[in-house]
Amino acid sequence: MQTVCPYTLQPLKSIEVNGEHIIPMGLGVPSNFTVPASLNENNRLNKELDSIFVNDSYIKFLAATGGVSSRSGPVSLTLDGVGVQSGTNVACTFTHNDLQPKVKRHITRNEDGTITVQGYPEQLESEFNRLRKDFAKKGMRIEKTDERALDNEAVKLTMQFDLFVAEKSIAKIAYLYAVSVFGDSFINSTSAERFRLAFNSETKDIFDGLNFQGRFFLTDKNRNSPFQRLKKDDGHMLAIMGLNGGGNYIFVYVSLFGCVDGYYKIKKDFAVPSTLVSNVIVLNIDPSSKEITKRDLRDKDVIAAFLEQ
C-alpha cells in the first residue's frame, strides 16, 4: 500500500499529486501505468531526466522503429548523414518499418538558367512536380534534361547516446516499479534512498559511488540468461523477485525495447508481502499496442539463476 510520495516521502494527502509514469509515457506504455507522486517533483524529473532520455537519439530510434505512438502521432526520428561516395548531406527519417532519406540542399539554380535537383527517386519526382506547378502558375514550362537519382548509396549517420542519462533513467524505472509492488515499506527503506540518490545524481562519480549491486548494459548477449528468458520479442519487460531462502535480497530487472537493460540486487530492509515470496513477477509491455501482460511465476530454475548473479 502506498500513502507517501516516492520522491519527497510526504503523505500524499498533504501535497498536490499526479500520476508518475513508471516508464516514461513517450516509450509506449499505457497512460495509467503510474504511481502517485508529488506534482512538483514529477515535473522537475520530467524536465531534468525523462524528457532528455525519451528524446535521446538512440532511444528515440528504438521508439520510432518499434512502432511507438505518442499523443501527436507515430514517433519518428530524423538523423543527419553524409553519402559515403558523393559526400552529399542527407537527412534520414526513421519510422516504423520505413526509412525515408532526403538530400538536405536539393535545389540549385545555375548561372545558365537551369535548375539542378538532387535527391532520391521519390524525392526527385516530388520536387519536379512541385517545380512544374510553380512555373506553370507563371506561364512557364520546364522539362527534365538529365535524371540521375541518388540510390543505393551507403550513408554515414550520426547518432548520440548519453549512457549516464540512460543509467539514471533505468534506475528510476526500477525504483518506481518496486514502489508499485511494495509501497510505503520500500519507499521508507535505506535501499530506496540509494535509488533516489542515484537518479538524482549530478555526476557519474556520485552515481558510481553508490555501489549498486547490479549493472546497466546494452543487450545481454547470453540468450540462456534468466533475463533473456523472461523477455518477449523487442518489448519492455519489468521483473521483480522476492526470494524465500535466497538471502536478504530481492532482484529488480528492467529491459526497454529488449536491449537497454539494467538489474539491481536490493537488500531486503523492508517488509515484503508473503504473497511475493518465491515468486517472479513479470510485466511484458508491447510498446506498439501498449498492452501489458502480467505473469506470476514459481520457477525454481529462474530463481536459481538469479541467485547465481
Image: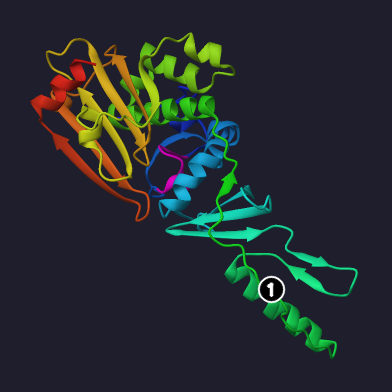
- Using the image as rendered, state which of residue 62 and residue 103 is in the foreground: 103
Q: Is residue 43 left or right of residue 187?
A: right
- Residue 132: x and y in percent read 74, 83
Q: Is residue 143 visible?
A: yes
- Using the image as rendered, state which of residue 7 and residue 294 is in the foreground: 294
What residue lies at 58% left-to-right and 59% top-to-bottom?
Answer: 101
- Using the image as rendered, state which of residue 80 and residue 248 is in the foreground: 80
Q: Is residue 309 left or right of residue 234?
A: left
- The scheme the figure's colours follow is rainbow
Q: Secondary structure at mark 1?
A: helix
Q: Is residue 22 magenta?
A: yes
Q: Callout 1, which amino acid? A: Glu
Decide: few, some or many residues near mark 1? Use Cα within 10 Å; few <14, some 14-19, many ≥20. Answer: some
What residue lies at 42% left-to-right and 36% top-to-bottom?
Answer: 36
Q: Is residue 123 left or right of residue 259?
A: right
Instruction: List the single residue furthest toward the bottom.
Output: 139
- Residue 50: x and y in percent read 53, 36
Q: Is residue 106 left or right of residue 55?
A: right
- Using the image as rendered, state which of residue 19 and residue 136 is in the foreground: 136
Q: Is residue 277 visible?
A: no
Q: Is residue 135 above or below residue 157?
A: below
Query: Start and end of the magenta stretch?
Result: 19-28
Q: Which residue is mark 1?
A: 127
Q: Quadrant of the C terminus?
A: top left
- Residue 90: x and y in percent read 65, 54
Q: Quadrant of the N terminus?
A: top left
What residue lies at 70% left-to-right and 75% top-to-bottom?
Answer: 146
Q: Is residue 27 above or below residue 306?
A: below
